[in-house]
Image (spheres, rainbow, N blue to C red):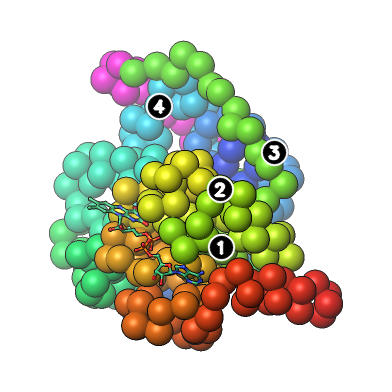
């Protein structure tokens, strides 16, 4: 079976869930080979990657990779593409992942597809385009297919494999060293899951009415173990911080469940959430465009409906 390289997304020695999703996806198309770039490699990491189906793990446990932004990882992957001739390379569709993918495509003279939400036979990728208004299927026709896949596009499933470790090294070029990381600042983490990675997101819009009222959204989110999001109208009003904005100019989320509360469903908002598996809407206007993409909708006042929903969820726990 042809190897499929999966770039491991890891922070502070912790493997991000999207890596397990990519391994699960890779398994359906070939033999997954994880690629660990940077310091922090451990037996624990190997065990985790093997548990999710990595037949092999290429390890470049090199501090220099972390010291020079994204270029070294692209050089490492380009070396592996040349040496191992994989069938494809899968990378998480984060800002960093997409930059690595673009650089890798240039280095290997290959085509690249970004923001895939599915990947099938022949490496045909499904991508939402035009702000999510249209879904297209595309295939790379030159070189090694390089595909970045959105977070939460696949449900990770364990399927133990060998996880055979192979050490690899990369001789960094001068240009790869031309940008250096000078400081890392840790983002304050609350108790809620990270918005872009969350399996459930509860978002509030202008209909919420005020910053104080966002407590209604937070309570519903907490009852479900969800992340909180907001429309741009809500963040522009200062009701919720900008880093929680979902949409074209905010974060893109692809959760299993997205609950939109008091959000009308403007195209720019949809662009960031419409690949959610299930969309639930609470809105008092039955003609609100968000209902067009809802799997389940409640026409009603969010101040009445949302607390009742929260109460029911808590009761059933
Ligand atoms: C270049 C550009 C980029 C943009 N990027 C983004 C982006 O990234 N993200 C984003 O969200 N927007 C973005 N926008 C803005 C977008 O066009 C909309 O203006 C915005 O999404 C509207 O937010 P909203 O749905 O919360 O507010 P509104 O459109 O005002 O909708 C509020 C909704 O709440 C409902 N409602 C009101 N009161 C209640 C109640 N008591 N109970 C239940 N329902 C109630 C109303 O019926 C209405 O449907 C962008 C716009 C531009 C031009």
Q: Residues within 10 Å of mark 1 (few under 14, many from 20)?
A: many
Q: Residue at x 41, y 79 (%)?
A: 285
Q: Residue at x 42, y 45 (%)?
A: 237
Residue 211, disc: 2
SS label for mark 1: strand
* Residue assigned mark 1: 201
Which mark sits nearer the N-terminus, 4 or 2?
4
Residue 92 seen from this side: no
* Residue assigned mark 4: 69
Which mark sits nearer the N-terminus, 1 or 2?
1
Give the CA separation, mark 4 to mark 1.
30 Å
Which mark sits nearer the N-terminus, 1 or 3?
3
Residue farthest toward the top in the current orientation of the protein = 182
Give the CA separation, mark 1 to mark 2.
18 Å
Q: Quadrant of residue 149?
A: bottom left
SS label for mark 2: loop
Which mark sits nearer the N-terminus, 4 or 3?
3
């Amino acid at each position: 079976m042809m190897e499929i390289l999966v770039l491991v997304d890891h922070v502070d020695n912790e493997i991000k869930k999207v890596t397990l999703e990519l391994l699960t996806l890779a398994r359906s198309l070939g033999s997954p080979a994880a690629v660990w770039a940077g310091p922090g490699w451990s037996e624990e990491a190997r065990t985790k990657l093997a548990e999710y189906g990595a037949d092999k793990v290429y390890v470049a446990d090199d501090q220099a990779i972390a010291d020079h932004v994204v270029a070294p990882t692209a050089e490492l992957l380009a070396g592996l593409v040349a040496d191992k001739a994989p069938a494809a390379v899968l990378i998480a569709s984060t800002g960093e992942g997409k930059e690595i993918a673009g650089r890798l495509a240039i280095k290997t003279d290959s085509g690249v597809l970004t923001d895939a939400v599915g990947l099938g036979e022949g490496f045909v990728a499904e991508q939402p385009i035009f702000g999510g208004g249209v879904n297209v299927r595309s295939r790379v026709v030159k070189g090694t297919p390089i595909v970045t896949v959105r977070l939460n596009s696949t449900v990770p499933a364990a399927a133990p494999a060998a996880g055979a470790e192979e050490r690899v090294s990369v001789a960094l070029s001068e240009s790869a060293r031309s940008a250096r990381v000078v400081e890392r600042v840790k983002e304050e983490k609350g108790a809620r899951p990270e918005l872009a990675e969350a399996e459930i997101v509860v978002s509030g819009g202008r209909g919420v009415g005020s910053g104080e009222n966002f407590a209604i959204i937070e309570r519903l989110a907490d009852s479900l173990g969800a992340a909180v999001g907001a429309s741009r109208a809500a963040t522009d009003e200062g009701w919720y911080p900008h880093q929680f904005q979902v949409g074209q100019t905010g974060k893109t989320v692809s959760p299993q469940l997205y609950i939109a509360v008091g959000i009308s469903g403007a195209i720019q908002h949809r662009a960031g959430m419409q690949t959610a598996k299930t969309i639930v809407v609470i809105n008092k206007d039955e003609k609100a465009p968000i209902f067009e993409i809802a799997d389940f909708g409640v026409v009603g006042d969010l101040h009445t409906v949302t607390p009742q929903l929260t109460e029911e969820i808590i009761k059933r726990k």
